Image: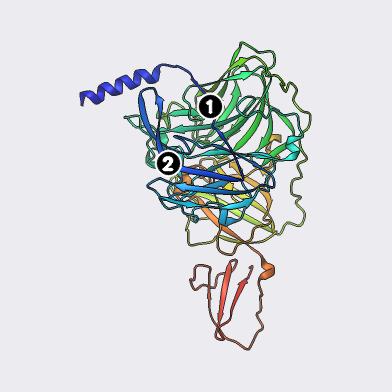
Amino acid sequence: MKKILLITMVLFVISSIKAQNQLLIPPTLTGPNFNLTIDYDSVQFFPGVFTQTAGVNGSILGPTLIINNGDVVTMNVENKLVDTTTMHWHGVHLPSEMDGGPHSKIFPNTTWTPSWTSMERASTMWYHPHLHHKTYKHVMMGVSGLIINKDSDEGALDLPRDYGIDDIPLIFQTKVMDANYQIDANMMNSVMDTLFLANATRNAYFDAPAQIVRFRILNGSPMRVYNIGLSNGNDFWVIGSDGGLLSAPVQNNRLLIAPGERYEILVDLSGMQGQNISILNYGTGIPSSTYGSGTMMGGGAIQNYNNNHLNGADFTMLSLNVIAQTLNPITTIPATLVSVNPYSQSNVDENRQFTFTSTGGQSGPFLINGNTFDMSQVNYVIPLNNKEIWSFTNQTPIAHPFHIHDVQFNILEINGAAPPLHMQGWKDILLIPGHMSTAKFITKFEDFADDNIPFMYHCHMLVHEDEGMMGQFTVVDNNTLIVDHNNTNKTLLKTIDIFGRETNANNQLLFYIYDDGTVEKKIIIE
Ligand code: C2O
Ligand code: CU
């Protein structure tokens, strides 16, 4: 007992020393074949203390995958965990079979080998496990990595792109630590994510050249929203969102970033050699009822929320020591970037409505249209090439970052107003404020039809997701389906869904079994 107390006191002393650590820059991997091994290891977040972690090809996080538009990539994902897991390519437009959602299990000591052709615009995406009920745990243990998509439009621009020099990956995450300084991956304790890490580095610094530096920021935290700004009060420029570059840099002073979101920003450090500035989380400016803010309004307060010193606090995310310029520095912010052609609102095929409700105030669990996630239920069958507007009403007292697989979308409105300029490009996450807020996006379901394997949509706060704030849809090619109501030569025996259950429900793919032994695939849209 005494020993444990002593160790705890020593750890407390160690942890209160504000020594800075050099920012870890994940190594890069280039394709077309990527070997990714998920395994346990340990990290010394606190010198001399070994914290058990999990990572991809290393002790924590994973390599940054560099993928060019048009590359035919193959991933060999080996699972050396004792748990079954999956690997999802967040943001990537690919066949549902390759998507790595909860249906694509990788059992322990097996390898999963998805393959696809990259259709991505230049952008920053990421990969992480996605097994239902285990996403939070596996991400909390450390499994997450970045994907940098490249294309020729981006390549033609004068942008910083020396990885680790002036083009810096930044994965912001928090961890819950137990009394023995081990990661507590139990969702029940998610509220105490008091350890903030930048690229798995505590109190991180980076030696940044005195020129324009690009940061590719991922909020990889399980729950927490950040409000990013610079300690010297300067503006920065947002150049890209989840699915690609913006049409022009957007000058901002603050940037709200929700779990799962990515933004690329340019920071101008010209003429600042020898100075030190920081990227801060301005937690005091996070809107109320948004996880991370100091003011959570409404009933059913999250227990112990106010005991986490990060909530509502301003703190340093990364400290920058400005050093000499590189040989070929970028010193001007480009006036324009790429052409962004958002979907037009004419000829929309479908409007879908989503309402979020809570079964327990701010802590949930939360429901989408009254439902909790059911693996055996396909919530929507979407005809291939449908252009759709999805509209949301958030009746819960907390903001939710809604994420959809397969597609990128354009945000049409948030609470009736057009989104800010930096949110007018390609997105796969939309933070929907709480308390009866509304939002809308438009998207199109192109290229990948599959009658059997669904894509997911869910809240990207991982506790909400694991607790069931998720649904699924298939994309089906109607042109291959025969809807034949007039055939009189045969008698319908039964109608079954894709899981073989008898049903007459509309709006989903059904198999009509006839007495002459024929089977027809049909979808009847209400
Ligand atoms: Cu980043 Cu369905 O997830
Ligand atoms: Cu949520």
Image disc number at residue 133: none
Which quadrant of the view contains residue 445?
bottom right
Residue nearest the observer in this picture, 251 or 83: 83
Residue 457 location (% of width, % of height): 56, 51
State whether residue 292 appears in this view: yes
Residue closest to the far left: 1
Which quadrant of the view contains residue 215?
top right
How far is the residue under mark 2 from the one under mark 1? 34 Å
Residue nearest the observer in this picture, 189 or 173: 173
Residue 234 location (% of width, % of height): 66, 19
- Say which residue label 2 marks: 39
Residue drawn where x is 78% and y is 32% of the image: 336
Callout 2, which amino acid? Asp
Q: Is 30 on the left-hand or right-hand side of 304? A: right
- Say which residue label 1 marks: 283
Q: Is mark 2 on a helix, strand or loop?
A: strand
Q: Is residue 495 above or below residue 79?
A: below
Query: Earlier along the polypeptide chain: callout 2 or callout 1?
Result: 2
Residue 313 location (% of width, % of height): 49, 24
Residue drawn where x is 72% and y is 37% of the image: 246
